[in-house]
Amino acid sequence: MATPGAGKTTFALRVATELKNNRTVDRVIVVVPTEHLKIQWSHAAARAGLALDPHFTNANGVVNPQYDGIVVTYAQVAMHPYKHYAVATARRTLVILDEIHHGGDAKSWGDGIRTAYADVERRLALTGTPFRSDDAAIPFVRYEDDGEGYLKSKADHTYGYSDALADGVVRPVVFLAYSGEARWRTSAGGGVRRAPRRTPQRRANGPRVENRPRPAWRLDSRSFTGRSYATSPTAQTYA
């Protein structure tokens, strides 16, 4: 498990190239949630020295021998899990499951990847969010009792936001408070309005708005049934 932006793709491809170069595996399969990610992974793999085919189809079902492996979607695997099982077990294979939490999006997706990749040589599951709001179990993820009657996912390796921040991999996230107005409705149905106090400093630093009643645009009544011509003043902002 690694925080978003930590470089999960780079890490996975480094693992893949090393396992391929030392002949631990002969083939690499990457499984992704969407079609456009197949192209992204293929391009990233090419930069790492791996040739992965993003155009593998279930209809053909044959891996082009000119490639080191293929990139497929979870939906592809779910449609023909036994075909993908044959591809993954025909040679010693590393399967990279990108965003593995999507394996619980549909029961067929989870069942499909369990069937297809249960017996592969190596599996590497990647995610930045090892949990689901619907509490569906994520395939190939180990769960442990948290002591309060709930099962919690247990990663083999965790690289959190604080780790990435300390290493300079990600930028700090800062939420700045600005002046403004908030409106909301209470459970009793009443409206509440709150605006921060406009201090002299806020007034000096904020934009100056001047409303001038100049007809900058018109709404044609012929375009809006039952409406007459209308003009609107233009609000001009000066920094």
Image (cartoon, grey):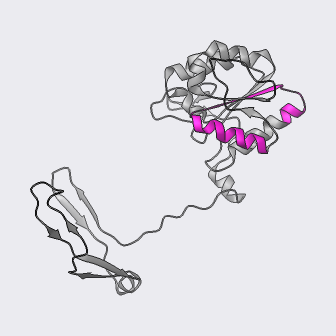
* Residue 149 spot, x, y in % from top left: 49, 28
Question: Does residue 53 lie above or below 212 as drawn?
Answer: above
Label count reads 0
Quarter of the view holding residue 228 = bottom left
Image quadrant occupied by the N terminus: top right
Residue, far front = 222
Viewer-closest of 5 and 162: 5
Residue sitting at x 71%, y 42%: 43
Magenta stretch: includes residue 176: no
Residue sitting at x 81%, y 28%: 66
Residue sitting at x 60%, y 24%: 139
* Residue 235 spot, x, y in % from top left: 28, 77
Viewer-closest of 229 and 8: 229
Residue range in magenta is 18-47
Image quadrant occupied by the C terminus: bottom left
* Residue 197 spot, x, y in % from top left: 30, 77
Question: Does residue 87 lie above or below 70 as drawn?
Answer: above
* Residue 44 spot, x, y in % from top left: 72, 43
Question: Does residue 174 lie above or below 224 as drawn?
Answer: below
Magenta stretch: includes residue 45: yes
Residue, far right = 22
Decide if residue 153 is on the left or right side of residue 52.
left
